[in-house]
Image (cartoon, rainbow, N blue to C red):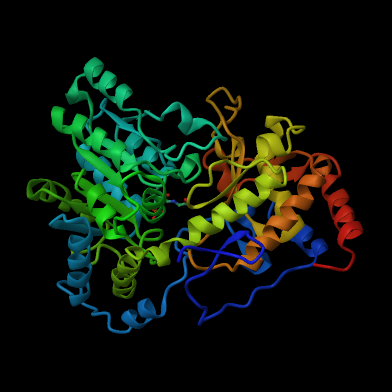
Amino acid sequence: MPKVTYFSGETFPLEMHKVRIIQKLTLLPVEARLAAIEKAGYNTFLLENKDVFLDMLTDSGVNAMSDRQQAAMLIADDAYAGSATYTRLFDKLVEIFGMNYFLPTHQGRAAENILAKSLITPGQVTPMNYHFTTTKAHIVDNGGEVVELTTPEGLSVTGNHPFRGNLDVAALKKLIAGKGKDAVAFVRMEAGTNLIGGQPFSVENLRQVRDVCRQHGILLIMDASLLADNLYFIKIREAGFADASIAEITRAMADCCDIVYFSARKLGFGRGGGICIRDEEMYRRLRGLVPMYEGFLTYGGMSVREMEAIVVGLDETMDEDMINQGPQFIEHIVKTLDGSGVPVVTPAGGLGAHVDAGRFVDHIDQRQYPSASLTAAIYIASGVRGMERGTLSEQRNEDGTEPLADMELVRLAVPRRVFTLSQANYAIDRIRWLHANRRIVGGLKWVEEPKILRFFYGRLEPVGDWHHQLVAAFRREFGESL
Ligand code: F0G
C-alpha cells in the first residue's frame, strides 16, 4: 500500500518498514548551530556530522539497510578471486537487467572512468538527457564533449510534466544527421536525472532513443544510479505500466540499452558500483581497466560485505513498498511547502526536495550566492543540512568572472528509509518559518575561495549582520524551543 487516506480525508505517506536499529541524533540550540556554521565557513560540506540534526546533504552511501541486508553481510565470502559473494551479485544482476556480463567498480564515478576511457575518441560528442558532475568530468577529461538534449520542460523549475528527464528525440536525430554517427561516442540516459531535480524519463522515451541508436549503430548507455525512483514514477505516472511489476519495468528499460552502469551508493542500499554489459566483445574491451583502477574482476574495489548487502538491496529495489518511501516523502515535503507558498521545484522528483532559492531570497544578488546563503540559513533555523546547487557550485571563468547558474537551488536529499514523517514535518515547519522571515537572510562573501571545486572546501562569511538577526528572530518566535 503506497499511501493511506486519513479520517480527515487527507492522504499521507506511510512507512512500510519498522525501525530496528537506531542512531541517536542531537539538535543543538540555535546559538550553537550558528557557531557551528561559522566554524564551517558557512559551507555545509564543512559541518561536522555531530552538529547536524537531519543530514539531507545527499542520499549517497547513507541509505538505511534492512535486516535481511545486515544478515547477508555475515555470510560474505572473502576471497580475492572467485568469491561466492561475487557469483551471487553477478547472478542477481543478470536476473534483473538480463545482461550476461558484469564488471564491478568501487563506486559510480569509477564506472564512468572506465567507460569514458574506453569508449571516447577525442573530439567525439556524448548526447544525453542531462549531465551529472562526475560524468561530465570524465567525458571532458578524455577529450569528449557533453551535449545536453533536455526537453524544454526539463529545464523549467515549475510545472507538472511527469517526465522532465526525457531526452529530446528530434534533437538527437538532428545532431546525428549534422555530425554523422561516427562523431557520437555513445548516448547516455540518466535515470532519475539528478541535477534537474531527480526527474524521471519514460519507457516510451527510452524506446524512441533506442530506435534512433539502433538505426545508426550507436551505443546506448543508462546511468541507473537513481533507477529506483525512476521505476516508481513509471509505475505511477506512465500509461500502460500501472499493472506491471517493478521487475518488469526494470527489464523493459534494460532491454533498450547496451550497457547499464550504477552507483550502488544509491541503487541497492549499499556502497559500490558496477557496469552491466550485453555484449561479450564490449566486455572484453572494458575489462582490462578494472584490475588496473579498481581491483580484481570479482570484487572491483568493493568489500564483499557490501556486495552481499547490494545483492539483497537490488532484490528489495524490485519491491514497490521498499522504494516508494523516498519519492512519497519528497512529494509530501514539496506539496506541503508549495501549498504554504514556499518556492520549490515541481513536480516532486526523486532523490530530494529542491527549494528554489532564486525566488525564496530574490533580494540577494546572485554574486552573493543566494543558494549558499539559504542553505546556511536553513541549517541555522533547523539543524538540517542541505546542499547548495547554484552559482557557488560553478567554477569561475578564466578571466575571473562568475558564470551565474541557470537555477539557484537548495537540495534537501531524502536518504532512503532513514527519516520518519515527523522529522520531515519538522524540516518543513522550520523552512516555512524561514520563508516568513526571508528578508532577514542576506548574502555571503568569500573568505577563502579555492580555484577548483570551491563548493567543497571554500569558506565564506555573511555580508552584514543577518546571521545574528536571524538567531534573535528565532528566539522571539520559538522562545526556549529547539
Ligand atoms: N551518476 C549519478 C546520477 C549520481 O547521482 C552520482 C552520484 C554518480 C553517478 C556518481 O556515483 O558518487 O558512487 O561515484 N551522486 C552523488 C550525489 C554524489 O550526492 O548526488 P558515485
- Residue at image position (58%, 41%) is 345
Residue 465 locus on image (x, y percent): 86, 44
Task: Specify whether residue 92 is in view.
Answer: yes
Quadrant (top left, top right, bottom left, bottom right) of the C terminus: bottom right
Q: Nearer the viewer, residue 56 or 373?
A: 56
Q: Is residue 355 above or below residue 474?
A: above
Q: Within the image, what quadrant is residue 75 found in?
A: bottom left
Identify the residue at image location x=52%, y=25%.
Answer: 398
Residue 459 shows up from this direction? no
Q: In the image shown, does 453 or 238 lie closer to the viewer?
A: 238
Q: Of 36 and 266, which appears nearest the observer?
A: 266
Q: Residue at x 42, y 53 (%)?
A: 229
Image quadrant containing the N terminus? bottom left
Q: Is 79 positioned to the left or the right of 400 in the image?
A: left
Q: Is residue 425 left or right of residue 221?
A: right
Q: Residue at x 21, y 56 (%)?
A: 97
Give the percent coordinates (x, y) of residue 91.
17, 67
